[in-house]
Amino acid sequence: MTKKHVLILGGGFAGLACAQKLTDERFRVTLVDRWNHHLFQPLLYQVATAGLTMSEVAQPLRGILSAQKNVTTLMDEVTRINLDCRQVHLKGHVLDYDYLVIGLGAKTGYFGHPEWEKHTHGLKSLKDAMQIRREVLLAFERAESAADAAETERLLTMVVVGGGPTGGEMAGSLAELSRRVLKNDFRRIDPSCAKVHLIEAGPKLLPMFPGGLPEYTLERLTSMGVHVHLNSPVQEVGRGFVQMAGERIESDIIIWAAGVEASEVTRTLAGIPLDRSGRIEVLPDLSLPGHPEVFAAGDLVALTDPKGAIVPGVSPAAIQMGQFIAKLVTAEAEAGTRPAFVYWDKGSMATIGRKAAVVSLGRLQMRGFPAWMMWLFVHLIFLMHMRNRINVFIHWVWSYFTWQRGARIIQP
Amino acid sequence: MTKKHVLILGGGFAGLACAQKLTDERFRVTLVDRWNHHLFQPLLYQVATAGLTMSEVAQPLRGILSAQKNVTTLMDEVTRINLDCRQVHLKGHVLDYDYLVIGLGAKTGYFGHPEWEKHTHGLKSLKDAMQIRREVLLAFERAESAADAAETERLLTMVVVGGGPTGGEMAGSLAELSRRVLKNDFRRIDPSCAKVHLIEAGPKLLPMFPGGLPEYTLERLTSMGVHVHLNSPVQEVGRGFVQMAGERIESDIIIWAAGVEASEVTRTLAGIPLDRSGRIEVLPDLSLPGHPEVFAAGDLVALTDPKGAIVPGVSPAAIQMGQFIAKLVTAEAEAGTRPAFVYWDKGSMATIGRKAAVVSLGRLQMRGFPAWMMWLFVHLIFLMHMRNRINVFIHWVWSYFTWQRGARIIQP
């Protein structure tokens, strides 16, 4: 009998977790990704600020899956999904499937202002991160040989939009880069004069964190030299500026960490309900309405689980979904008999530069150094499956004591 | 009294060594480089074959020189040198100098066939290395989803031109990549079917090595699966092919390690004698004829030292020249009273893949594993000044036992 073919779209947390759990030889698995690597997104901001190198947060998918002989990896881009013909169209060719798992993830969202994209940098891919690193490092280089003070100030002004974890970590890391890492590297300019603005539409930073953690984050970032703008929805973004109500910031480096929307491929799913940001409204078992053989996982899924929890677009949720789907497929459970996916909230954490982080685990709340140690520990565990963990760890220990960042190489 | 201004062009081995030795506060030093990093070129082939990451062979110049307060680093490109006005024209602006040190290095040379450049990859810069890595890894990815056997074979054919150390190391490393590193990563193709051709115009590989070392190298590379073509001068290079006398190889990946010529900036030096490949024919004290205040160092220098040794274009020679010039400048020695530069040959070594290398130190000759250990040791010493040595070392130890290469990330 021919093996059933499970086609997984996307090698992110969801797709990879699903593939790794599909070890049953009765299934032939194909994993398709645009790139040849799995990306550890939570540390992407470190690549953007020259703290880590590309290969310390990314790992070749083939390397991860090389031992799993029933998995074939293809580097190609998904253009269209035809649910009725059970076919997926790639740039290269067309693939059939018995089971389909859609884990194509999310991209940067601009709240209905796609025209803002070309003026800003997202922070979703290695490419984004490498571009930001390049722009930021070049800005300091240009400032060092700038003609006048006005040009210098403009070059050394950076804006981060979005007060969530990504935005907060990014702003904090940029502040450290200018105030500590590059401190002694220049002769004509003082890098610590660089202005880092963090813009948040709502009344507080890290709104999803309880207790005093948002206030603590605000206080920490401010003391690190970050200019935080609360209650400041962005009205307009153009070439070299961000416009808020009553305030305009001139900057060529605008990092957009304010919103995400699902991969546009979801728009090609005929007759499948999507929410405003293009996320798939899946059934409780993560399958698509009317298509029990098709599942979606990760942050392109819009789902409220049986316990009433809105499943967030974070890596633990994506991994849990991927594994849940792998179990259903392996069991070949009929649509009616399937359990519902239940999200296990492992809590959330965010780091605010060196020695400072916030952690929220159920009732437990932590801040400052202990929280930072915990953040470090958890991320090292996460990185465990990556061969780079030793290097990353040494990098971190080294950076902690020397304030050096090894990846300060401008992308040729 | 105003400090004398020493302008150093190029942050390679020569320029950096010179800057680092110019600690005398009586001098104001400006170091200009096209990039923001110093590159450890001897390991560039490892970046090209995904063995090392960019930031493991490159280090920010500002980081290296941050403690040396009399040195200013500028990232800019030299367009023209005006010896009579004592001015150097950069893309950005114009700089005056009291002393000038030209260490702009060499670029890939095509023996009067500049039109071949666009069909080949050089291996002089990080950009070259990253392009080669990208092309090589993409070739395997494309082959995995190739339509027919012919296309697969074409995709998996790689050519290295030039049987010197760079070419030999490159070919060996490519052979290992396909036969060992990627061994289990693919399902449809067998990566070890990849053909690596090494083309040398002369009768032997590594001709500069004595005794049986060239023969040993040939035997090793052949046993590693490299197709070595001796006595095969390249007659023509075009889009996707290399033509030798009687043989033509179809390949989209052609790596050119056959020749170098001096940076074209030397052509702007009015009235200064250059050799065929544009290298500056300096006086014994490394200064330019008629310009005792201008020196040249590194592989854009053509010089035979008093002991009759032709100074080779290798990093030890460049470092020795840079330091020699720094001493002359610091002593402010008059033209007539200066000693001649004498090259100290520390011997030469080349690695031929894992566990195999050749070493020649005066009378001493080594090959195989002991030579490889020596190569490893010497290169770690070289890397000592780089903060990355620990990472590189771990990378190497890791790769040695696992055959993994961590940098197998396709450049986004």
Image: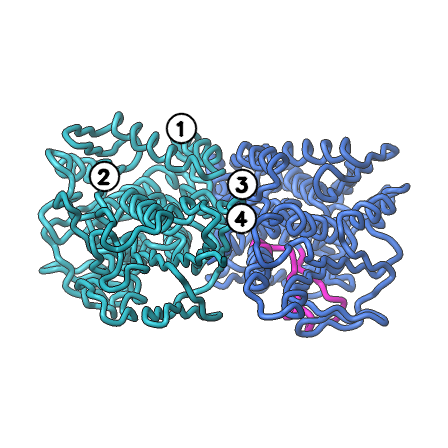
Chain colours: A cyan, B blue
Answer with the quarter of the image where residue B290 lies.
Answer: bottom right
Q: Which mark is residue A401?
A: 1
Q: Residues within 10 Å of mark 1 (few under 14, many from 20)?
A: few
The kind of secondary structure element at disc 1 is helix
Coordinates of residue A25 in the picture (x, y in percent): 48, 48
Displayed quadrant of residue A122: bottom left
**Three-letter amino acid code at disc 3?**
Phe
Q: Chain of mark 4?
A: A
Taking depth in this image into account, of B199 and A149 the one nearest to the observer is B199
Region rendered in magenta: B106-129
Front residue of B43 and B149 = B149
Q: Nearer the viewer, mark 2 or mark 4?
A: 4
From the image, state whether disc 1 or disc 4 is nearer to you.
4
Amino acid at circle 4? Lys
| Discs 3 and 2 share one subunit | no
Residue A259, x across and y down, in percent: 22, 56
Give the Cα distance between marks 1 and 4: 43 Å
Q: Do labels 1 and 2 touch, CB within 8 Å?
A: no
Asked if residue B80 can be seen in this view, the reply is yes
Q: Are marks 1 and 4 on the same chain?
A: yes
The CA span between labels 4 and 3 is 64 Å
Chain under numbered label 1: A
**The magenta stretch spans residue B379:** no
Q: CA distance from mark 1 to mark 3?
A: 32 Å
- Disc 2 marks which residue? A344
Q: Is residue A195 left or right of residue A14?
A: left
Residue position for label 4: A69
Q: Foreground mark, 1 or 2?
A: 2
